[in-house]
Every structure is written in structure tokens, then in C-alpha cells.
Image (cartoon, coloured by chain):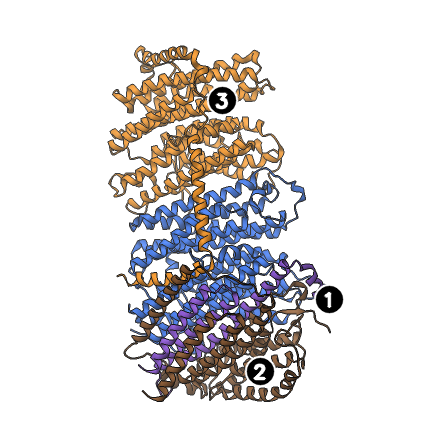
Chain colours: A blue, B brown, C purple, D orange
Amino acid sequence: MSTTITTTASGYLLVLAIMWPVAGIMLSFVTSGRGVERLACVVLPVGFGIAVAVLIAVAQGGQSQIYVVGDWAPPLGIALRADGISAAMMLTTAIVMCATGLFAQGEFSQPSDLPEARSPVVFWVLLFAIWSGLNALVLGSDLFNLYVALELLTFAAVPLVCLKGQKETIEAALRYMLFALIGSVLYLLGAAMIYGAYGTLDIGLLSERVRPDPATLIAASLMTVGLLAKTALFPLHLWLPPAHAGAPAPGSALLSALVVKGSFFLIVRIWFDAMPGLLSFAAAQLLAALGAAAILVGGALALRQKRLKLLIAYSTIAQIGYLFFIFPLAAGLTAGIAWSGIAWTGGWLQLFSHALSKAAMFMAAGLIAEALGHDRIAELGGIGRRLPITMLAFGLSGLSLVGVPPSGGFVAKSLLLMATVMEGQWWWATVIIVGGLLAGGYIFMVLGRLLGSSATPLASLAPVSMRRELAALSLAICAVLLGFLPLRSSDFLQIGR
Amino acid sequence: MTIPFAFDIGTAMLLIAVGGWMMVAQGTMVAVIIFVVYGLLMAIAWVRLSAVDVALTEAAIGSGITGMLLLSAAARLRQTEVTSTLPSFPIRLLSGVLCAAITSGLAVVVLLPADVAPTLAPMAMANLPETGLGNPVAGVLFAFRALDTLLEKVVLLLALLGVWSLAPDRLWGGVPALDSYAPPNDILVFFAQVLPPFGIVFAIYMTWTGASNPGGAFQGGTVLAVMWLLVMMAGVVRAPPISCLRLRWLLVAGPVLFLMVGLAGFALAAGFLAYPAGYAKPLIVVVEIGLALSIGATLGLLAAGPPERNHQP
Amino acid sequence: MNSATLFGLCSAALVGLGLFGLIVRPEPLRKILAFNLLGSGVFLFFGVVARRGAAAGLGADPVPQALVITGIVVSFSATALAVALVLRLRKLTDEVTSGLGAASKAQEDGDHS
Amino acid sequence: MMTPMIASTLLASALAVPLAMMALALSRRGTGHTANLLPLAPLPALLAAMMVPEDTSVVLPQALLGLRITIDKPGAMLLGAASLLWSAGGIWARAQVRSQSQERPFTVWWLTTLAGSLGVFLAADMIGFYLFFTLVSLAAYGLIVHDDTPAAHRAAGLYVALALLGEAFLLMGFVLLAAGAPGSSLLISDAVAALPTSSWRDTTLLLIVLGFGLKMGLVPFHVWMPLTYSAAPIPAAAVLSGAAVKAGVIGLIRFLPFEAALPGWGEVLASVGFFSAFYGVGIGITQANPAAVLAYSSVSQMGFLAAVIGMGLAAGNRAAPLAAAFYAVHHVLVKGGLFLALGAASARLPRNAWLVMVPAAVLALGLAGLPLTGGQIAKLVAKGPLGDGLAGTLAQLSAVGTTLLVLHFLRRLSASAAQDSTEPPSSLLVGAWLTVAVASLVLPWMFLSTIGAASWNTVLSSEELWSASWPMLAGGLLAAVLWPWHTRLPRIPEGDVLAIGQRCLPSVFSLGATFERVDSYLRQWPIASMCVVLLVLLLTLTLAVP
């Protein structure tokens, strides 16, 4: 029942979503001085508008928005497709981008009377690049086009890690780069096999043609593991802590909140869109087991960190683990099993709420480090009284990570929990609960310090801009507000499947 | 066994042998030289697979400019080479076993092909006349899958920015240093004065002919990049400071042109990256020329590395 | 056994070799070389797919060929970025270990005075 | 008679006012003495408890999760008593906040805990209940650490860890409860009605009992109580031990299916309860710190309450929830009053010590069921579910133990009163304290007719008076016998089993160290990249498994 793929009414928005930041990148190269920063003031709000427009178009249409690039329909050409999860992911990206932009305005400003400086130009271009890469990744429906988007994302993420230029950060960036390259090559190898077996790379066409033969299974596992390396799922997380802890605060926010989610998104695309029904029970359990190990090890290690940014980075490793419960729990999604729908919603809410709260948390940590000149947890005493807004941002986002109601994290984790129980996969419920306890441990450990008595005189702190504190706080509030989304979001996230 | 097949067997064996040697060779410099040889062998393999476009790209980029880059890096690192130790034997053994398992998995896939190999060749040929091009590979690159090509240009720009970002703050806007490639000497200067005219003509021909024959913007751009590197290394032309606005325009000109043509498709043709009927070929050729220039500049600067000294006006 | 299958087996071997090099070679530049070997193995696999898809008067399916060309360019960009990282890291390490950090900085500053 | 409009507005304001005040205190605008808000915040709740007719409901708009709050008989009684205590405690807290810089955070924590504490009595759906329960559990952290001493931080840390564990149990339990209920109703009553037939009945019950038992301080989850109450400022200890702990009681009352007799579960709960009741006495009499003695008394009293609820559940006794709530109301006021007595004693001049000691003695002996006090009635009402069998005997024995314990408390109280001689508390503070004390004597008499368990005549019959008196006499006798030895009793550290736990702590930390070693091993390049290859193979194999 192969039907030709045609462009829908609002499809042009998808092209704009990718090309708008791309235009920003190109123009950044030829505007000097403060131009790039001013450019950001235009690119960010318009990009946000595009994301909202896509969301509205998908919600109103109740079906995927499609754009056939150059009017060459797949399999020969490339199509872009926005379903519920891509629209929601785009909006999350846009929110984090705008808040990060607001946050970074102070940190990455061009001095007005000096020649162009390095880090502002680089930072803003990388921000645009991550945005276009992510949009291309969530909208793409061609496995090779997705490879290019993936590389775009990686090439933007690596320089962001070492923007500070110290030896440690360059080491972290190199390690990240090489490991991510292994991932890309394995993904590409898988894509080659898929083309060799089916003569198409289009996800929609593949879903009609796939069959469980050895070539397909090997290709799928190559692609999946390649993407796991980029997602830093335990035990492939070697690069994440130094990379995310070494980047400047807005960079860490983007990396932890969004970049690792890009490759995860693609894994979901493969198993739920390109090859529905091919993920065996055992394989889904394997993925979830890795996620469970990530939750436990990441949480336990976060508790033992001495530096705040490393603690947050290990918390990211743990929180990524939750996402992989989507594979065993939402497996029945295509078959229309109700609990799978709950798990699906829970998994995505976990992704979105983690994106919002982790970005807020890295920003708060950045502000604390800026005020104190270090981020040693043992010496954070009393800073909460001096930076109440920052502390509130940290606290609220922490509550979402722990899963305390009302917050996005709470809804996400309780939906996942509910699904584990209802589908009779008890063992994951224990992990979710222990993970929540570990998260509670490290969040309260930090909060206790922030509220505790101060070792150093607070008067000697460097001043911190209120606007930047509010940027962090607004993200944390968004993470909490996510918990108030009516369950109608569940229907939206299933648009296009 | 036919002679061409025997030749193929030889090439394949040689590729594996040279590749294995590259992995185990003592000394980084030796390994890099083996890599250049390996690249040329690979180009031959591509010709044998009837993929001349890829063969040209592999020779120009995969072996040529990558080789130059790696050679200079190896030369720089040699001055302060630190001996690093291999992992313990059990780990080497285990990883050897695992990699062998991957190889056998792939071999199974290769040996169990589908009854009818799927292909898009007929569809590509059927639609090629619409683009006015004669080279189906160019058709795929600039029409059917133009989005990939456009995004890949952005990847190139980003990689360049990433390389530049490694400069210390005070050298931002400075000049890349090329002395590590080779100290300027008479032979280099001689080649730098003699070769470029031929190279540039060759590059233009490659780009132009790419529309209907093997070749195109990538290969042409790479030849330009190599020529530029050569004259900069020899000191015939000074490396430009990366803050130079004209250089920046040169870098983005091709992609910007491509993007604008693509966006014009919204108004003038069937949509983004579609070409108006009848104007496809000229538009593609114009885009290819722009891209060749930008690719040349980008690849050259990528190989030149981050700025290492301040610009002296 | 035909040429395509032969080169297919060759690409399988190259992928294994490249992976092995990436795992066990400790020197970063050798890892980059291994990555290039691994990448060329994957591209060769595309080439085999293209050759097997020969039809409509073409010696090989043009789509995988185009993908490989894009792939080679991306792979070069990756190599250039990784090499730049290695060189920068080495430079910073040298400055630290030789204790000449201050001296070399002064020299670099002297370059443009 | 109130119009429904006014009634529901009043009901909503019982929760809205504390939350609004918290927002005010949080905002920059709320400078000045934010602590002045503390005594006022619970007043709407007090009014609502007195005036709003039973079974009035308010459904909040969808934007506020569509929460539903309802006032019923047990809820109203507890709400009234708790809001009275919160108000009196607020008067004390206002005087106690030491410095300007601490005033605002303390006020915010106080009001948050207050909102949660009152909210659990009113929430009718699971989400709202969980929300308020979380507020009261976690916000108490800020009250405990207020003194900023190492002991306070240690206690608060332990408290939060256990509270989160309880949250986790409850969350799981609620999820199961919702899953077992037909339809999409999240009302507690609907879900509990379906619980006896739910296929996850036993697991749900286990999780719910664990979660609420932890909040009530049933052994072995009692360790946080002594540490917390002796570390927190006295007004905070008063409201936490009096009012906040009742979140666990109301939880058991609301979430256990009393309609169906569940003998197994009821007896387990009752056994744990009685064990806690005697365990609290046994450890309590070894304590020197009067606050710790009161904490162990709470362990004992909550154990007794759990026994009442457990026996009610075992028999399917529908009157049990109301009886338990009645007993809890008495405990709210008495325990709060005793902590405030501690505050009054620490400031009162030794010369006037009797002014503190006499009311304190009446209050304390009330816990053991002193005739004519509210305590006698509370014990009498509790007898209903307990019955006359073994449980009834154990209950009377526990009254003996309680007598012993409160006498020990009074001794420690007078000892501490003799030591301190700071400025005497203002008459406002003493007045607030005495109000609570008088309420503890009077309120049970007033509520007696509303719950209809017994008449005044029954209470005043000689049989009942004797039944209340003999345990007290026995306890007094026991105290007299033990008197010479009281200095020789072992001094068990506050938090008893915790001391053992702390010896095991290194092994837990070494588990963390093991994880760290595993992590640093896996993060080596060759190992991690080998894992990539290994995972490819593993995933392929698992994919091939049908």
C-alpha cells in the first residue's frame, strides 16, 4: 500500500525551521564585531516563533506535517516530517535556546571598542548550529540526511566543550570527538546495509518494507549502538562528565539538555518509526537494563562528586537512563495497548522535563561558580542566601529531577512507574524508586550546603546579573509547569503514529 | 578466473594488508605515509566498482588533502613524541576477537545478498532529464538530495569554525602558520609557481565537466585547495588573516548562493531546492562554481589549521 | 564470487581492522588514522551496494555514490577538527610539562611585535 | 446556617490563605515582620473546622489539577485541633525567630509545612493528598535546620532521607491504587472502595502502610523522631510532633479499606503498633533530654493509634476511623502543649516553677488517660475498636507504660526548669500555651456527642473511672519502685537503632567506592570502545531472540 509522499499545507515551516538558523550561521561569518550578538537577537525569537507555528500546525492538523524537498519524492528524494514528538521536541529546543541566549548575553558579549573576540563569535555560531542540527534531526525522515544532521550536531558540540581553551577541556573535547566518530561511523554502516537491503533510506517507506532478516538486524543494532555512544548511555559514558563539566555554563546547558537527546530521538525513530515491531523483548530489556545501570551508577557517583558541575553531569547520565525504559514499556504502542501510550508519554515528558531542568541547573551552577570563583561543593556554604533566585532555580529544577510533585519530572516518573507495574515489569519500578532516592540524596546534599552557614564572607562574592538568574529560574519554572500539562499531551505526542 | 577479477583480488588483498600494516606500523610518520598509499589503492578500488566520481573524490580528498594534513601533524608531533603504552594483552586479545566477530557479521551480510539487489538507478536515470544534467551522481548531489549537500556545506563551515576556535584568545583573527608542512625551499617555490595555473585550469574543467561527466564541485574545490596550500606553503602568497572579511565572504559565498537558489524555489519553482523548469542546469552549474570556490577556501583553511600568529598588516 | 562480493569482504575486514586500531592504539593521531580506515571500509560497503545496484545502463547505482562523496567530505572535516584538537592539546601539554609556559607565551607574543 | 457559597469559600481559604501568605513572605514586598503572619495563617482553617457543614466540597479549576477538597467528620476534628495548635505555635515561633536574616526563610518553611499539614485533612483526591503530604513532609526540613547546628543538620538530613523514602513508598502505593480502581476517578474514596478486590491489593497495602507508618514513626522507622524533635526549635517541635505527624494517621484512616475486614493486615498493623507502643516507653525512660522523652512518647502513642486502626481494619469496624481520629485530636493538643511547656519551663524562674509544672503534669498524665481529662475519653473511645480481648489488655498495659514515661518526663522537665533562668516568657506566650492545654481538656468532651461513641454518663460512671485509674496507679507504683534505679538505667543514645546503623554506614559508603572503581574502569578508552563493539554483538543476539 505504498502511497506517494506529498507536501502538506504547513510543510514549508519545516524547511524554515532548519534553514533559519543555518542562515544565521552563514551571516555570522560575514558580520564582525557585535553583529553576531545582534543577529542572535533576531534569530532566537523568530526561531521560537517557527517552533510554535509548527506545533500549532501539527496540533490543528492532527497529523504529521510533511515537506518533500525539491519536489523529489522519496525514495529518490528527501522528505521532512513533523509528527507530535518532533513538534514537542522543537518547542523544548526553542525554549532552552532562548533562555540560554538570554543567559549568555552577558557572558558572550563582544567588547564594543575592541576587535572581534573569539569566544562570542564561536559561541553564537555554535548555538545556531546546534539549533539547526537538532531541528534537522527531529524533522528528518531519511537515514542519511539524519546522518548529516547528526554530524552537524557533533561538530557544533565539540568546539563548545573546549570553548574555554584549557588543557582539560581540550582533552575532554578530543575524547568526545573520537568517541562520537565511532558512533557516527557505525550508524553510517548500518544505513549502508539498510540501503543495500531495501533500496531506500526513507523511514516511512522502510516501515512498510522491513523484514527481520540478519542484514536488517545487524544494521539496526549497528545504528542503535552508534547512537548510544553519542547519547552517553552507560557504559558508553566515558566522555560525558569531563565534557559537560568543562564547557562554559550556557554550553553545558545546551549539551546536557539537548545534544544528548538528539541521538536518543533518532534511536526512537529507528525502533518506533522505521522498524516498528522489530525490537524483540530481549533487546528491549537489554536497552532498559543499560538504562537501569545508568540510573544506579550515575546516581551513586553523583553523590560522591566534589565539584558541582561534575555532580550535575553524573546526574545527566542517570537521568538519560530513564529514557530507555520507553523501549520495553512502550513496545505495544503500535498495537494500541493503553499502557504503552502511558509509558510513551512518560518517557517523552521525562526527556522534556530533564531538558528544561538540567539546563536551568547548569545555569544556576554557572552563576554560583561565577560568584564564588569555584564550584567545590564542600565550600558552597550559605551562597543560597546571597543568590536566592539562583538557589530557587536550582531547587525547583532539582525537585523535577528527583520527581517531587508538582513537576514535569514527577509526572514523567510516575507515568513510567505506572506503566512498569501495569505491564508486569516490576524490576524496573525498583530502579525508578531507588533512582529517585539517589537523586533526592544529591540534590538535598547541595541544597543543604547552599542553605547552610557560610565559610567565606559573603561580601567578597562577585556580582551576578539578575537577568541571568531569571533566565535560569524561568527554565526551572517551565520544568515545574510541565507537571500541570493536562494528559491531553498524551494524544498530541502520538500524532503521526 | 578472468584477469580483471584477478586484479580485483590483488587490490582487495593489498588493501587489507596495507590497512593492517597501517594499524601496527611503528612510528606515526610511517603510518601516515602508508595511509597515503592506502588512499590511492582505495581510489583504484573505486574505479573497479565503476564509481569514477568517488574515485576522484577519494584520490583528491581521502588521500590527497587528508594525507597532507596528517603528514604535517605527524611532523609536528614527532618533535615531542611521547611513548604511550598499548593496553594489556588480554584486552588486545579480547578486542581482536570482538572486532573479528564484527567482521564476520558483516561478511555474512555481504555473502547473503537479496535476490534482486535494490537500486534507485532506473529512477535516477528517469528523472535525470528534468535536471538537464548528464552525470547522474551530480543529479543526486544537486537535485534529488540537494538538502544533504547543502547541510554538508554547513558541516564544513562548522568544522572550520571549530578549528579556528582552538586558537588562543589573543590570536583570534590572526594568520594560520604553514611552516610545519615544509620549510620554504627552492623546489617548493618552483612547483608553487609552475603548478597553480595548470591546477586552476584543471579545477575549472573538473567543476564544469561535473555536470555531465565524472567530476564536480568537490573534486574541483579540492584541487583549488591543494593549489592554494601549495602557494601559501612556498610563501608565494601570504596566508590571509582569518578576520579578513573578503575571506569570510569567499567561505560562505557558495553555501549562501546555494541557499538563496533553494529559497527562490519557493517562489519560482515547485518548492525549496527545486529548480524552475528549463533553468535547472545553468542554475546548478552556477551553484557548483560558487561551491567549488568556497569548498576550495574551506578545505585549504581546514588543512592550514587555527591561527598561530597575529596578523601583520 | 564477483568483484562486488570480493570488495564487500574486503570492506568487512577493513571495518574490523579500523575498529581494532581505534580500540587499542593509544596515540590520538593513530586513532584518527584508524577512524579513517574504518570510514573507508564503510564507504567501500556503500560502493559494493552501488555496484550491485547497477542498472539502467549505469555501472553503479548513483545514489550510494553521492552519499559516499558527501561522507568523504564530512569525514575529512572530522579529521581536520580532530587533528587540530590533538595539536592544540600537545602544545598545551608541552607548555605545562616543560615548565616553559611563560617562555613560549612570550615568544608567541613576540611574533607579532 | 451558612450558605453553600460562603462555606466553600471558607473551606478554600483554609488552604489558600497560608499559601498566599507564603507567597507574600517569599516576595520582596513582604518585608517587615513576616513572622507576624504565623499565628494568623491557620485561623481560616480553624473557622472552617468550626463552621463549615460536614461534607462540603470544593473542586478547584482544571488549571489547579482539578483538585477536590472535602471536609468530613474526622477531617474537621483534626483540622480544628491542628489549626489551633499551629496558631499557638505561631505565637511562640514569632517570638523565637532570632535574627532578621532568618525570619523570612523560617516563615516560608513554616507556612509551607502548615499548608501541607492542614491540606492532608481536607484533600479528597489522591493527587491533592500526595501534594499536601509532600509539602508537610519535605518543608519540615527547613524548620528542623533552623538552629543551624551540626545536630540540626544531621537530624534534618536523616529526616529528609526517610521522608523521601516514605514518599517513594506512597507514590508507588498510590499508583497501584489508581491502577486497581475502575474508571478514571482519582477520588480517594473510589480507589479505596475498589482496593479489596484489586489484584495488587497486598502490595498496595504494604506500600501504603510503609509510607504512612514511616511518617507516624512506627518502629523501626522511628529513628528520625527523637533526633528531629530535640534538634528543632521548640515551637517547631510542638507543631511537628502535634500536628504534622497526624498526616500519617489521616493517611491510614483515609486509605485503608475499613469496609472490608482484612484480619491478616489488621493484625500485622496492630502488632507493629503495640510493639512501638511498648518500645517507645522502654527507650523513652532511659532518655535524659525531655524533648527526646516526648519524642519517644510520640513513638509510643502513634504505635497505640496504629494498633487501634489495625484492630479496626481486622474487624472491618467502620467506626474505627472516627475513633482513631478522636484519639489523634487529643494527642495533637497534648503533645503540642507539652512541647510548649518545655519552652515555658526553660524560661520560667525556679521560684515559679509550679506555674509550669502543674499544667504540664495534667497534660502529661492526660496521655495516660487521667480520669476526667480528655485523655480518659480518648482511651475510652479507643476501646471500641480494640475490644476486650488481648488487644484491650495490651492497651491497658500500655497506659501503665505511658504513666511511667510521663512521670519520667515530668522529672526531667523539673530538672531542666531548675537549670535555666532566662527571661520569663511574655503573658501572650503563656496564654497561647494554656489555651492549647485547656483545649486538650475540654475539646474531647465537646466532640464526644458528635461522634456518638459514648455519653458523658458512661464516662463518669465509676466503672470507667476505675478502669482509667488503675493503670495510672500501677504506673505510679512502678515509677516509685524504679525511682532508686533511675540514675542507673543505661543511657541509650537518641535514635537508638540508628547508632547500630551508623556502624554499618562505612559499608554503604564502600559500596559507593565500588561503583566509583567500576566507573573509572569503564571510562578508560579501550574498555569503553570495546563496550561499543560488545554491545553491537549483544544487541544483535538479543534481536535475533524471538
| Residue to which mark 2 is pinned | B224
Query: Element type at marker 3?
Result: loop
Which residue is more in the foreground, D329 or A438?
A438
Q: Nearer the viewer, mark 1 or mark 2?
A: 1
Q: What is the C-alpha distance between the residues marked 1 and 2?
A: 33 Å
Q: Which mark is residue D289?
A: 3
Query: Element type at marker 1?
Result: helix
Counting from the top left corner in percent of width and height, residue B278 is at 47, 88
- A415 sits to left or right of D360: left
User: Going 41% across and 25% down the picture, which residue do you hit?
Assistant: D298
User: Label 3 amino acid?
Assistant: Asn
D111 shown above or below C1: above
Q: Are marks 1 and 2 on the same chain?
A: no
Tell me if residue A340 can be seen.
yes
Q: What is the C-alpha distance between the residues marked 2 and 3?
A: 87 Å
Mark 2, other Cα within 10 Å: few <14 / some 14–19 / many ≥20: many
User: Label 2 amino acid?
Assistant: Leu
- D389 sits to left or right of B16: left
User: Label 1 amino acid?
Assistant: Gly
Counting from the top left corner in percent of width and height, residue B261 is at 53, 79
Counting from the top left corner in percent of width and height, residue D45 is at 46, 32
User: Going 44% across and 25% down the picture, which residue do you hit?
Assistant: D295
